[in-house]
Amino acid sequence: MAEPTLEIQQQVAQLRHQLQQAAYAYYVLDNPVMEDGVYDQLYRQLQTLESQYPRLITPDSPTQRVGDRPAEQFPSVRHNIPLYSLENAFNLQELAEWQERWRRQAPDVQEAAYVCELKIDGNALALTYENGILVRGATRGDGVSGEEITANVRTIRSIPLKLTLDFPPPLLEVRGEAFLPITEFERLNQGKIAAGEPPFANPRNAAAGTLRQLDSQVVSRRRLQFFAYTLYFSGNNPEHILKSQWDALNLLQRLGFLVNLHRQRCPSLDAVRAYCETWDTKRHELPYMTDGVVVKLDDFALQQRLGFTQNFPAGDRPQISRRRSSDPHQGNHR
C-alpha cells in the first residue's frame, strides 16, 4: 500500500479540522457555518482518503464516531473521581437553611454568588480526555464505579472527540448529563409502537436504555444529546486558573461542549429564588425534560475552603445528599 504524501496528510488534517469546526458550530453554538450538502461532501472526501491510507485514521476523526462492531459487554471501570450526590431542597425555606449551614462554616463570608443550572432529567456520564483526545466514557453506576461505554459516547455529536484547545492538560475529566430530546423520544416510541414493541415510559428511561445498547450504530440513530456541567484536570489549569463555576462553564463551551443556555449567575439568594420560580413554569416550554434546579456556590476558593477542589486527582469529598445525583461540589443544592 502506497504511503501518503505530505500533501495528502495535510489534506486529511484540513478536512478533519473543517468538519470538527462545522460540528462545533452546529451542535454547540447552534450557528451552522456550512450547508449539510457541503459537510457530507467533505466527510466523504475524508472517508475516501482514510480508506486509501488507513494509517492516517485517528481516534478523533469525525469518521470514527460510530463503531462497526457491537460490543460483547460493558466492563466495569472505577471513576477517577467519585460522582457524589447533591443535597435536596424541596422548598425555598430549605434553600435558605442550606445557605445558613455553609455560612456557619465560613462566618466571615457575608455575600457569595451562586450559579443556577437546570437539572436535566437524563443520565450522568464521566468523560476522560488524555492530551485532548476522548479515551473513555463511563456511566455513573454507583458513583464509585460505572460501565465503560466509550463506543456509545462517541456517537453523541455534542461530545467532542478532540478538545478545541491548543495545549490541553495531560488528563481532563468532564461531567455532564446525556439525555434524549422530547422530539427524539416521541420519534423513537412511534417506531417501537409500529414494530409492536412496548414504548419507553419517559425520555430518561429511553436515554438509559440507549446508552446500554451493545450496538453503537443503534445509539447513533437515536440522537442523544449531552450537556456538560463541570470539569477536573491534572496539572495546571487549561488556558488559565479557573476561579469559579461560571468560568468553568464558559471554558467547557470553548473546549467544544454543549453547555445549557439557561444557566445564570445569581448575586444573591433572592436572585436564586427568582430563577427557581421562573423555571418552575417555563420548564414546560423546553425541548427536553428537567427535574429541578442545581444551585452551586460560584467561587472555587470558597468551595475549596469548605472541603472541595477542582484539581485532579481530587481529595476525599463527603456525600451530602439524600438523593442520587451526579455533581460533587460542596455548596451545591438541588
Image: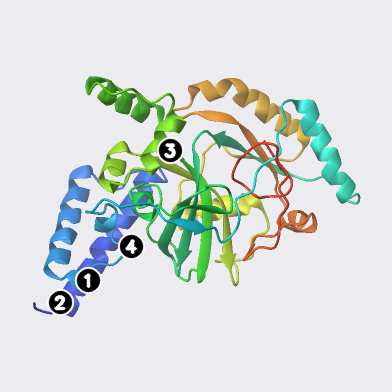
Camera-nearest label, 3 or 1: 3
Residues at marks 2 and 4, CA–CA distance in whole angstroms: 19 Å
Question: What percent of the width, then of the height, locates residue 232?
Answer: 58, 60
Q: Which residue is mark 3?
A: 208
Up-down: is 110 above or below 145?
above
Residues at marks 3 and 2, CA–CA distance in whole angstroms: 42 Å
Camera-nearest label, 3 or 4: 3
Residue 180 shows in the view: no
Image quarter for residue 221? top left
Q: Which mark is residue 56?
A: 1
Q: Which mark is residue 60?
A: 4
Question: Which mark is first along the chain, 1 or 3?
Answer: 1
Q: Are marks 1 and 2 in contact (CB under 8 Å)?
A: yes
| Dot 4 amino acid type | Asp
| Dot 1 amino acid type | Leu
Question: Which mark is first along the chain, 2 or 1?
Answer: 2
Question: Which mark is first along the chain, 2 or 3?
Answer: 2
Residues at marks 3 and 1, CA–CA distance in whole angstroms: 34 Å
The residue closer to the viewer here, 20 or 62, is 62
Q: Are marks 2 and 4 in contact (CB under 8 Å)?
A: no
Residues at marks 1 and 2, CA–CA distance in whole angstroms: 8 Å
Image point 46% across, 46% down: which residue?
258
